[in-house]
Image (spheres, grey):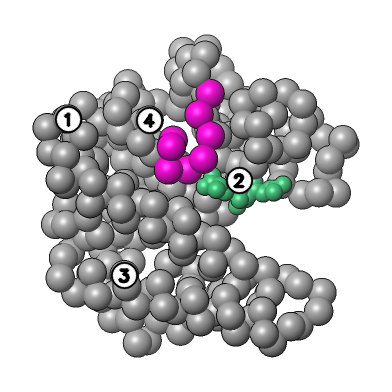
Amino acid sequence: MATQPSAGKSVVLYTAGTPNGFPISIFLEELKTAYGNTADYDWVKMSISDADIGKVHNQVKSPWFLEINPNGRIPAITHNSTPVFETSAILGYLAQVFDKERKFSRDPATETDKWAEEQGWIFFTHGGVGPMQGQANHFNLYAPEKIPYAINRYLNETKRLFSVLETQLGKHEYLAGDKYGIADIKAFPWLRIAPRTGVDLEPFPNIRAWISRIEARPAVQAGLKVPN
Ligand SMILES: N[C@@H](CCC(=O)N[C@@H](CS)C(=O)NCC(=O)O)C(=O)O
């Protein structure tokens, strides 16, 4: 896989190996597996390190990258000349453009109720699990000072959100019903690293079974290797 854009591939993914980067590489690998090379892509490994600001060309706050994502964060894509940023916006865009047979997504025009349910779970992760687990990671693993109030607040809220997912996965095989798709792809990279965050998944058997089902997919394994 090239690390710089090359002629012929219309999608370029700007990413790093994090729970925000992986949903896009996983979905692109799923699309490639399902539809062939129409959804083939190049990726560019970005530096998210503050220490690299102004030093390396591919740091996320580089002027050229801010033209693609004004927020200066991964992931972002360009599709031909269209830039798209924010994980969930990118998943929705790729679904609209490439998932013509709706193998991994719902059609807002023809299955509006299912699409709304899918959107609900995507937003649940985008506005809930991601930010809360991200803060739990920060205060539990990386903060220079251990602040019990902050650690407990974010770990407890992460567990509460997991219990919502646990209940849903007790009723359905996948988050937005019985079809694997972009709601699962958005949430999976966060849930799989729960033990590293400090959340024991023992009390969440439905989540554990769902992680195993998703992890077994070859496209998921391939997506988790981008960037290397
Ligand atoms: N809400 C954003 C979150 C993206 C995000 O936080 N990306 C992190 C890496 S996981 C990043 O690029 N951090 C670099 C920085 O903040 O400078 C999304 O869903 O795309």
Under tag 4, what secondary structure? helix
CA distance for labels 1 and 2: 33 Å
Q: List the residue tagged with mark 1.
A: 109
Provide residue 146's location: percent of width, then percent of height: 76, 83
- Which amino acid is tagged 2? Ala
Q: Is residue 177 above or below residue 34?
A: below
Of badges 1 and 2, nearer the viewer stands 1
Q: Give the number of the disc on residue 204.
A: none
Please, what is the three-letter code of the amino acid marked with disc 1? Answer: Ala
Q: Which is nearer the N-term, disc 2 or disc 3?
A: 2
Mark 1 CB within 8 Å of ligand 1: no
Specify the segment rendered in magenta: 83-90
Gap in angstroms between the C-alphas marked 3 and 1: 27 Å
| SS at mark 3 in the image | helix
Where residue 193 sits: x, y (%)? 49, 68
Which residue position holds label 3? 165
Task: Point out residue 178 in the picture as x, y percentages from the top left corner.
Answer: 14, 57
Foreground of the two, 1 or 56: 56
- Verify CB contact (< 8 Å) between mark 1 and mark 4: no
Element at label 2: loop
